[in-house]
Amino acid sequence: MTRPVRQIWLYIFAIGMLFFVNLIRSGIIVDKSLLPRFFLLSLLLLGSWLGPLRKKRIFQNSFFEISFLLFYLWNLVSSFWAIAPSESIMQSQMVFLSFAVFATVAAFQRNNKAFENIFIRIHLVALILSFGLAFYKMSTLEFYDPYKIVSVSANNNLYAGFLVLSLPFVLTGYSINRGFWKFLSVAVAVLSVFFIIIIQSRAAYLALAAGSITAAIVMGLKYRDILTRKNLLTGTVAILLLASGVTGFYLSLDRTRQNYFLSKVPVWQYFKSYDQESAEKMLALRNKEKATNSQLTEFDFAEAYHENASLRMIFWGKSEGLVKLHPITGVGAGSWRLHVPAIKEPPNPEHTARNFTYSQPHNEWIGLLSELGLIGFLLALCVFFLPLGTAFREIFRKIPAPHISTVFYASFILGFYLFASFDFPFRRVEHNVLLFSALVFLLARLDFHRRDAETLRLPDRRSTALRLCVSAVKKTLFALILIFTLILATARLHGEYYTLKMFQQEGKNDDQVIEYAQKAENVFYKITPNTLPLAWFEGVAWYHKGDVYKANACFEKALEITPFEVRLLNDYGASLFSLKRAAEAKTVLLKTLEMDPFFDDARFNLGAMYYFTGNRDSARFHINKCRNSQKKIDFLKELDAPSAYPQ
């Protein structure tokens, strides 16, 4: 029998994941948190596999683990039909890291049962630090704006999801600890819910409600013995503290922000549809001159608060079109954002007054179905829902029922899955670290791995030496994949570093834009986080410098990996016209407008082309379809002028 892993390694690993991985940010790249965390997590996992776990059994060969590995392999295989393999490989390695987190945490937990409590205690401290960061951010704002509360995650919605996913750890900490750590769990639980409320993520409201109601129902049916006087008193005090905190926060706001705060409470209006009157009201608000800080802040002029849900539904509808085109295999991991502009129905809403695109569908389940097809989606259901189904089955079947922490983990993971129906938490490292750690502790409470592995185990006549050899091969293979993940992370960090430099030089120095775009691009990084290929930025710079031939070549290169990007098509059409290929240019711009009828840049370019080729009526037809603006007025005046007859 092997000795358990020493506790010092448990602390090092937990601190590494919950502090250095989950909290690190860097301003020298475009996405400040994703890639640094991706790199550090890969490094931490590799160190654990080669260090304290090198002689430990890591894989259980359970149905769950096999499903997880198949899910990863399907993501990786999808790069063969994806139009941008580099993005599919990146997304695949995100899945692999999630599996590696699960396997590593499970190995630590099997070898030392104290790991769960160590993990929880360190996470409590990490949450306190995150609250400190959030309070500090609030103190720097002249006026409170929930969208500017950036703590652990990149925005307020993702931070709210992080807190929802933290609740089962906090509640489990209360249930298994005594003294200081028990009281700390109560304080952290109150602050977690406080921040979920004040940062006003409606998806998190739904997740919190779903998790709390599920847990309350299950406890009422199977765990009535926990309703002791002490626990009821603790719950009452916690609710009073929470109510006092939220009330005090609300009273500290001015009238405008109080009304805005209250408008988020009826979450059912999140799904309100737009009508023409709403669209006109939004456009009128946008056209007003911004008030000074002494009156209102910028977020007060945002479109109606339910816009996010309505726009999400539009892109869910577009995703349906992708699924119909690729029902079995999907468009490839990480490729939703590259394909969705090709789907015409439903159209982008006119009231957005811009070409509006999302880099994610803001619904992980729709995203999985769109990118991985039916095969990948079924594998995902096994990975994400098999543990929950097992947990609820055991809770209602087993006598006595499993430990109360089983209810906390299962209920709030279920709530988190509801949150994932309105956002993209699976694409962020910090959420995957917490989610798959929670699944480990949930399944450990059920003794799931041992029983599941036994159902799959066949008679094994191999010698001990052969089994050890097979185990060594598995560990070596996974270590090599982790090394590859580090190489991938390094390449993409290099790309984003020069991409940020390129962004900083846009409109200032075309030569440096070209230089940085060329330095940024590599085999694993061709598309920037804003979904535009590096070659497009290089092409725009060449166009500004007057070298239309090089610009056109860059645009054609960019179209190979983003063939449906309207901004790129618009510039490609302009370069074709400059090369005296007017017929091709008009065809490209008409295709652009077919994909996005409200993209005015393409209409102005098309109108100009017709104008310069002597077709004034066609020019006027397209310019009249543009939104009202000074540019439109000036263009129509020129068309109506007697001199509006190009020679």
Image (cartoon, rainbow, N blue to C red):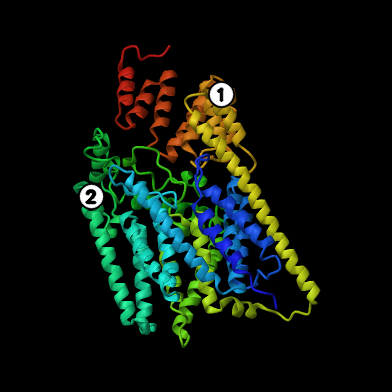
Question: In the figure, residue 92 lies in which quadrant?
Answer: bottom right
Comparing 155 with 87, the one in front is 155
Residue 336 % position (x, y): 51, 49
Visible residue check, residue 92: no
Q: Which residue is mark 2?
A: 253
Quadrant housing the C terminus: top left
**Left or right: where does residue 603 sit relative to residue 103?**
left
- At x 54% / y 64%, what residue is drawn? 380
Q: Which residue is mark 1?
A: 511
Residue 352 % position (x, y): 34, 41
Q: Which label's residue is closer to the chain start, 2 or 1?
A: 2
How packed mark 2 is, by other alpha carbons closer than 10 Å (few <14, some 14-19, many 20 or more), is some
The image shows residue 95, relative to residue 82, as above or below, that is: below
Secondary structure category for the residue under label 2: loop
**Left or right: where does residue 226 sit relative to residue 236?**
right
> Which numbered disc covers residue 329?
none
Circle 2 or circle 1, nearest the eye: 2
Question: Which residue is the extreme one toward the bottom?
Answer: 399
Residue 566 % position (x, y): 47, 37
- At x 55% / y 62%, what residue is drawn? 14
Secondary structure category for the residue under label 1: helix
Residue 270 % position (x, y): 30, 55
The image shows residue 405, relative to residue 497, as above or below, that is: below
